[in-house]
Amino acid sequence: MKRALISVSDKTGVVEFARELVSLGWELLSTSGTMRMLKEAGLPVTSVSDVTGFPEICDGRVKTLHPKIHGALLARRDIPDHMRQLEENGIGTIDIVCVNLYPFRETIAKPDVTMEDAIEHIDIGGPSMVRSAAKNWESVTIVVNPEDYATVISELKADGQTSRETRLKLSAKAYTHTAEYDMAISTWMRAQAGLPEKLFLEYDICQPLRYGENPHQEATFYKTAKKVPYSLATAEQLNGKELSYNNIQDANAALNIVREFTDKPFAVGLKHMNPCGAGVGETVSEAWTKAYEGDKTSIFGGIVAFNREVDLETAQMLKPIFLEIVMAPSFAPDALELLCSKKNLRVLKVDMEGEVKKQMACVSVNGGLLVQNQDLDTCALSLDQCVTKAKPTDAQMKDLEFTWKMVKHVKSNAIVVGCGGMLLGVGAGQMNRVGSAKIALEQAEEGLASQTHATLGTVRGGTVSEANGGAERSEAVWLSEPSSAGSLVLASDAFFPFDDCVTLAAQYGVKAIVQPGGSIRDEDSIKKCDELGIAMLFTGERHFKH
């Protein structure tokens, strides 16, 4: 009679698996908890202690570490001397091993886990049996995943044994199982001991990609085992073609921006890893209107993300525009139906619930890997941070907070200009900061000039004139309503090395600036702001994004 040893932590489907083995004439061997479960199910099972002639000792730490177990697993059936030694020592072969390991990851994930508890959940006998069986895969079938039970039973029923191909695949899975287990233990133990010189990465395949950034580059999308919010790895695709490498990069950048805004409906448009429009509103449709009006040109072929459910009104505005992806935590049924009428539009439902924790961010370099924590911190703004004579108004403070959250997601050197909860200009990735400022300010001016008579005015002499633009450069403002005006604000991801950015900003009507400060020439910028009546905040927090 062939024997199977079953000792599992994950008991999913194990009783059914064991019952099938018994019906095929197999003898079952087991230990403690698994054995009790099998007996309660009415299955005949022999204790490993009865096989070894030795009891479990040390609170179960020692039970399967015995020659009558490992000899039964490691002896090669094609070597007569191995089989003779088994016979001489009264050892029978074990032909199936069904083992998975103590839940170490689950244990250390507990916030109050102690070192003692973690150590007790380090499996010793289990990995030893798995490795022994996997090493002798030509003769022994090793099963570590309940998903493989059906395959093993099917082949046993058909041929009386598992195929060589299946045993090889199961052996590879077994070594992966023990490698992941040891990696989790090693990573945790090294963290306790303060040993940073090794880094282990573990990711599972999410999907193969047609190609990478360009057609001649191969690419694959991998995911972490742990589920996190704002992740494409767990997003539900409701419509459209499969995601590309560039889609995933851009969509991830958009989601990183969305998670900055939770208080009110927010929408962002993104192209090539930089925002090209963003807006906060009282409704999703208002937020989208602001995002779209900020840069109607760049959004063509872009990616859009929302922090609230997309309703029909918003979907109707989205449909005429060529977009690659629309993402949101949910979609109203009629909105989803309308968006899905566009065959190629990728519609993604993204989980945005749960605490956002810092993750490791990795960048590959030639022969190495750069690792840092994600830049999740965004300091709150307050009047205490103001370093100028002029102080920002309440409306300007709201816009400074908005642009400060946006600028950290723009490639540095980064400058953004906004007003009324709307992104109006983005200067990204220039080799000098004044170059980025010029791009952002010119874009803001052009965007304002294109607005309707009802929503655009220019401030002259401290009053709002309802002229649509004008040749004279003066302070352009976005009016949420004809009766209410705001003023342009500017945010910079790093300090101004000179006062040239302040001078340029004033020429375009900027009335408030937020930047980290920290330059040896900060006083030059402060002095220039005071001369021009501009309020400026120093956050003491830089947000370079390379």
Image (cartoon, rainbow, N blue to C red):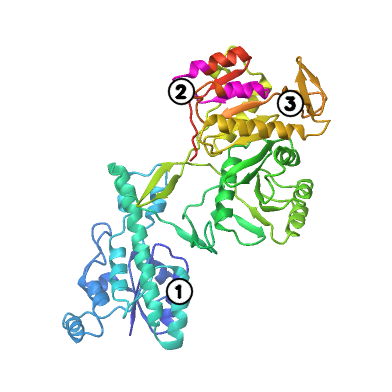
Q: Residues within 10 Å of mark 3 (few under 14, many from 20)?
A: many
Disc 1 designates what residue? Answer: 149
What kind of residue is marked 1? Answer: Tyr
Q: Is residue 516 magenta?
A: yes
Cα separation between marks 1 and 3: 67 Å
490 left or right of 226 in image: right
Q: Nearer the viewer, residue 31 or 190?
A: 190
Q: Nearer the viewer, residue 209 or 35?
A: 209
Residue 61: quadrant of the picture: bottom left
Q: Position of residue 231 (x, y in %)?
A: 55, 50
Q: Can you tell which of label 1 and label 2 is closer to the viewer? A: 2
Q: Which residues are magenta?
A: 501-524
Assign a secondary structure to mark 1. Answer: helix
Disc 3 designates what residue? Answer: 477
64 left or right of 277 in image: left
Q: Position of residue 119 (x, y in %)?
A: 30, 50
Q: Position of residue 440 (x, y in %)?
A: 63, 33
Q: Position of residue 348 (x, y in %)?
A: 64, 54
Q: Can you tell which of label 1 and label 3 is closer to the viewer? A: 3
Vertical placement of residue 220 versus 379, above or below? below
Give the number of callouts. Answer: 3
Disc 2 designates what residue? Answer: 518
